[in-house]
Amino acid sequence: MDTQHKTERRNSINRLRAILSGTILFSLVVTPVVEIEAAPRQIIILRHGEKQDSYKLTPIGQMRSLALRANYLGKDAASSLFPDGAGPDGIFAITLHTLELVSPAAQSWGLPLQLYSVVPLPGLSKQDEILQLNQRTQQAANALLTDPRWDGKTVVMVWEHDHIAKKKLEEQFPDEKVTLRQLLNLELLPQVPESWDGNNYDYFWIVDYGNPGSAIPTRFTMQKQVFPPPYEAVPSNDWGAPENSFCELFCESDWDNPENSFCKVFCFGTDISESPDTLTSDLTNNDDYILHHH
């Protein structure tokens, strides 16, 4: 790992520690629950925000986290998804990106996060990461449909999009269920998409379980996130449409070792056909930078 990447990782981990120690409460879930018949009243599913790297969100993703708290998920939100004012009974997260996205909303309710943690570690292969995500997604879904704490409750799940719904991932593991679409029985409803588009960060999937004690969903709704000022810069795109074109400049400084300071440009949008998610520019000096896939 080169010096710049070590600096990025150290700064990101330090920032994560600040989130965990100073801004939210969390409950690290490590053991399965005893299985009994149960089901939430409603599950609200959304994807993490726009991400900078394996450890944290871009500035736009961070703005989305504040916009979600102010408009949909937080206490006294302007267009609250909890019309009775009672708020969610539980909030589930899985990766650092999902944790960062939902922390402001969770903090507003004083609600511990149910963290089914998958953390990127040095040397962890992509396949091993997928296997961990499979396992933690299975554990979270099992808890929701068997643990009496969630029976008849409203739960928010902030998840990694491939493990919400991705047909290719499901086909890769034909002998087990690995996505929320499968595990929460959403595949029984014909209007549920087979995959969550990698370009879209802008929707809620709202799942109702209308028959008490039954794990079979009775209603599915897709709701687009739309943000008024001061959050109008946060993208709000139709399902299936790519992100609006925009670029962000992000810089980090290492005051102890100035040579390790760096800036990156993150570009999202319809004019970037080569990459489904982002392109990154490393700015090596004021006049020279190289655009590469990230």
Image (cartoon, rainbow, N blue to C red):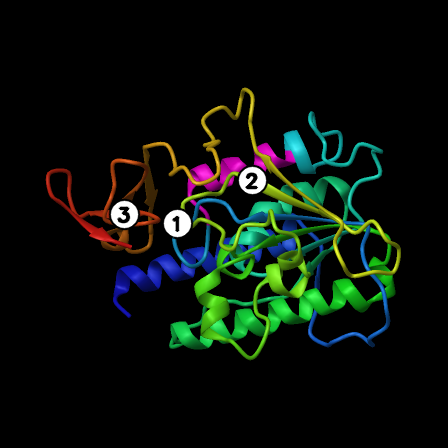
Say which residue label 1 marks.
52
Residue 4 numbered mark, or none: none
Q: How many labels does the image show?
A: 3
Q: Is residue 160 above or below residue 232?
A: below
Dot 3 amino acid type: Leu
Q: Residue at x 46, y 47 (%)?
A: 57
Say which residue label 2 marks.
203
What distance separates the C-alpha of mark 2 from that of mark 1?
20 Å
Which mark is nearer the camera, 2 or 1?
Answer: 2
Q: Which residue is drawn at 50% across and 45% down?
A: 49
Q: Where is residue 273 shown, x and y percent of the image?
A: 24, 44
For the N terminus, the image quarter is: bottom left
Say which label, 3 or 1, has the lower sequence index. 1
Q: What stretch is highlighted in magenta?
A: 57-69
Circle 1 packing at 10 Å, graded few (<14), some (14-19), many (20+), is many
Q: Is mark 1 on a helix, strand or loop?
A: loop
Using the image as rendered, state which of residue 78 and residue 211 is in the foreground.
211
Say which residue label 3 marks.
279
Task: Please say if the residues under marks 2 and 1 sit with CB atoms less than 8 Å apart.
Answer: no
Dot 1 amino acid type: Gln
What distance separates the C-alpha of mark 3 from that of mark 1?
10 Å
Q: Where is residue 207 shown, x and y percent of the image?
A: 70, 48
Circle 2 packing at 10 Å, graded few (<14), some (14-19), many (20+), is some
Q: Residue at x 85, y 64 (%)?
A: 38
Say which label, 2 or 1, has the lower sequence index. 1
Dot 2 amino acid type: Tyr
Q: Where is residue 265 shown, x and y percent of the image?
A: 28, 41
